[in-house]
Each structure stands twice: as C-alpha cells, then as structure tokens.
Image (cartoon, rainbow, N blue to C red):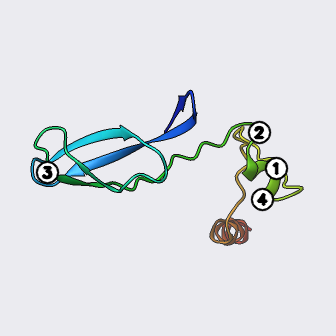
Amino acid sequence: MWFCDIGGQVPIYEYYCSSCNSNFELKQSFEADTVQPCPNCKTSSQRNFNVPTVIYKGSGFYTTDYARKNTPPTNTTNTTTPKTETSSEKSESKTETNTKE
C-alpha cells in the first residue's frame, strides 16, 4: 500500500513483534532499517513480506490473449432425440414375425 506524502510516495510497511505477538504498520522510506522497535513493548520487530494483490480489470487478458480461437458455441437447450431400437429389440421383433407365419 502506498501513502502519498508531500515529498512523494512513501510505502507503508507491516511489522511483527515476536515478543508481544503484535502487528503494526509504519510509513517509511525505502532506505529505512528493516528492524524497528515495537510501539507496545519497545523490543525489536521484523518487517513482514506480503504478497501484493493482483486485480485484472477490463475485458480480461485470458479471453483476449489465451482463449482458443473459433470455438463452436455450446448449445445450452436440451434436445430430445427419438428412441431407437436396440439390437436385442430388433431380434425379438423378427422372431415374433417368423413364429406368426
């Protein structure tokens, strides 16, 4: 996260104190020391490294860059097909006609 200051943009760093198990944030320059005193217990605390959040906006890079080209549209409506006779049903109907003669 960035904080806009009169002198420019200054990052906000998150720190963790292992002695009192507290988290706190400090606005400081890039050149600042990575070890800072905890505001609660005044012992040294270490800077946390967090993963930045990535947000893709707009039409989306996947649909414009990596999507398959010329894919046929999928049919979402249910279509019913007429029932066809199976081979066992066909053989039964043939035997019935032969016995009637």
Query: What amino acid type is highlighted by mark number 3?
Result: Thr
Q: Residues within 10 Å of mark 4 (few under 14, many from 20)?
A: few
The residue closer to the viewer here, 18 or 76, is: 18
**Is 10 on the left-hand or right-hand side of 68?**
left
Q: Is residue 66 left or right of residue 16?
A: right
The image's mark for residue 43 is 3
Q: Position of residue 95 (x, y in %)?
A: 67, 72
Q: CA distance from mark 3 to mark 1?
A: 51 Å
SS type, badge 4? helix
Of the residues shown, which amino acid type is indicated by label 4?
A: Tyr
Three-letter amino acid code of the residue under disc 2:
Ser
Q: Position of residue 45 (x, y in %)?
A: 22, 53
Q: Position of residue 20 (x, y in %)?
A: 10, 47
Tell me if label 2 and label 3 are in contact, CB under 8 Å. Answer: no
Q: CA distance from mark 3 to mark 4?
A: 50 Å
Q: Residues within 10 Å of mark 2 (few under 14, many from 20)?
A: few
Marks 1 and 2, the one that precedes in the sequence: 2
Q: Secondary structure at mark 3?
A: loop
Q: In the picture shown, does residue 51 fall above or below 25?
A: below
As helix, strand or loop, the secondary structure at mark 1 comes to: helix
Whole-number angstrom distance, CA of label 4 to CA of label 2: 12 Å
Q: Quadrant of residue 57?
A: top right
Real-space Cα separation, disc 1 to disc 2, in angstroms: 7 Å
Please name the residue that numbered disc 1 is placed on: 64
- Labelled disc at residue 66: 4
**Badge 1 amino acid:** Thr
